[in-house]
Amino acid sequence: MVDVGTRWLEFRWNSVKAHVTHYVLQMCINLCLDWSNYTIGGSLSYTKISYLKPATQYTTRVIAVNDFGSSNPSPNNTVTTLEDGKSLRFSSDKFKSLFVIK
């Protein structure tokens, strides 16, 4: 996981050494009754998934695929998208500023 927004998640993973034809990013909501699959090219190790629901818990995992088959899924990662209009306050002694991210 790299970054979280109100309606998107960004992912980064380590490439495997075996020739990977593609990756399958799997996502599900809450109890994981049904996984959604996103296919990502084998030369990539980064993607952004958009059009998600705000303030929703997602469970994700990645599978590497090559000519010989599929890897085991990575360990599950659970993340919750931010609420709509959620403010993030950042304070620094150096800047004494307030940043609002929407």
Image: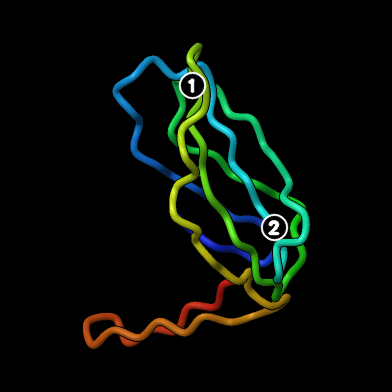
Q: Quadrant of residue 4?
A: bottom right
Tell me the quarter of the image containing the N terminus: bottom left
Task: Please report the residue visible at 70 percent of the width from the left and 49 percent of the height from the top.
Answer: 50
Q: Secondary structure at mark 1?
A: loop
- Compared across the picture, whether 87 is left or right of 3 comes to right
Q: Position of residue 60 (x, y in %)?
A: 57, 55
Task: Please report the residue visible at 50 percent of the width from the left and 11 percent of the height from the top.
Answer: 67
Tell me the quarter of the image containing the C terminus: bottom right
Q: Note whether 29 is above or below 48 in the view shown.
A: below
Q: Quadrant of residue 52?
A: bottom right
User: Residue 42: which numbered mark, if any?
Assistant: 1
Q: Position of residue 43 (x, y in %)?
A: 44, 20
Eye-nearest disc, 1 or 2: 2
Q: The disc labelled 2 sits on which kind of residue?
A: Cys
**Mark 1 surroundings: few (<14), some (14-19) or many (≥20) residues within 10 A:** some
Cα–Cα span, label 1 and label 2: 22 Å
Sequence-wise, the earlier of marks 1 and 2 is 2
Q: Position of residue 18 (x, y in %)?
A: 34, 19
Q: Secondary structure at mark 2?
A: strand
Task: Please report the residue visible at 60 percent of the width from the left and 63 percent of the height from the top.
Answer: 5
Q: Position of residue 57 (x, y in %)?
A: 65, 71
47 or 29: which is nearer to us? 29
- Which residue lies under the disc numbered 2? 28
Q: Note whether 46 is above or below 74 in the view shown.
A: above
Looking at the image, do the residues carrying marks 1 and 2 touch, with CB atoms under 8 Å apart? Answer: no
Question: Farthest residue in the top direction?
Answer: 67
User: Residue 99: which numbered mark, if any?
Assistant: none
- Compared across the picture, whether 26 is left or right of 16 comes to right
Q: The disc labelled 1 sits on which kind of residue?
A: Gly
53 or 35: which is nearer to us? 35
